[in-house]
Image (cartoon, helix red, strand yellow):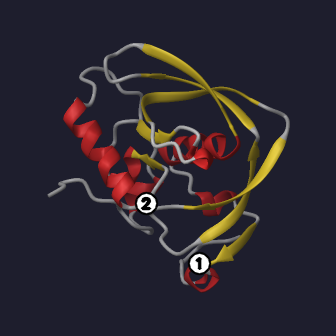
Amino acid sequence: MSVISIYSYPDPSLRKKSNELTLPLPGKDYAIEFINVMRKANGIGLASRQVGDDRPFIAVTRNPEKGNDEVEFAINPRILKVSRDLQIQEEGCLSLPGIWGLVRRPEEVYVSFTTLDGSKKKIRAQGLEAACWLHEIDHLEGVLFIDRAFKITRGVDLVSSFHGFKL
């Protein structure tokens, strides 16, 4: 049984910012459990803030639109560069079940991060994967996709019940 559970909005942990992580890094067993929690919830990404962990790390599925199940576990992820070209994706969030909205984000993103073994890595992501990286990095800053959505497409009745939410 998993000890990690996904927090739901309006839990205050979701609005906190993460600080840069120094040693020790999360262990491999914790990372595997974290990724398994994401997969069990049918997610393609998960941020540490969503499970109440103050350390800045995320899990992102690589090329999810191609049915890929490879997941990148990224510690201290940083956006290096984004494209000028924008895309609109319908986004949802494991911490906001039942709510979906249209979000405009860069089509392409370059990200650097630390891996579990402490090495540095850089990746380039496009399309849905790029949106996922940006969505999960937003979580580390206390930003939710509903803060960026220009239209809620599903779960409008749920959003209207959130106190203080403005779209």
Q: For this rendering, which residue is in front, 67 or 120?
A: 67
- Callout 1 amino acid: Val
Mark 2: secondary structure:
loop
Q: Looking at the image, is mark 1 or mark 2 nearer the viewer? A: 2
Q: For this rendering, which residue is in front, 65 or 161?
A: 65
Q: For this rendering, which residue is in front, 140 or 86?
A: 86
Q: Residue at x 34, y 37 (%)?
A: 55
- Callout 2 amino acid: Asn
Residue 130: quarter of image: top right
Q: Residue at x 64, y 81 (%)?
A: 156
For marks 1 and 2, the one nearer the N-term is 2
Q: Residue at x 27, y 20 (%)?
A: 23
Q: Residue furthest right?
A: 85
* Residue 104 seen in render: yes
x, y percent for residue 44: 49, 50
Q: From the image, tell me which residue sits under label 2.
A: 42
Q: From the image, tell me which residue sits under label 1.
A: 159
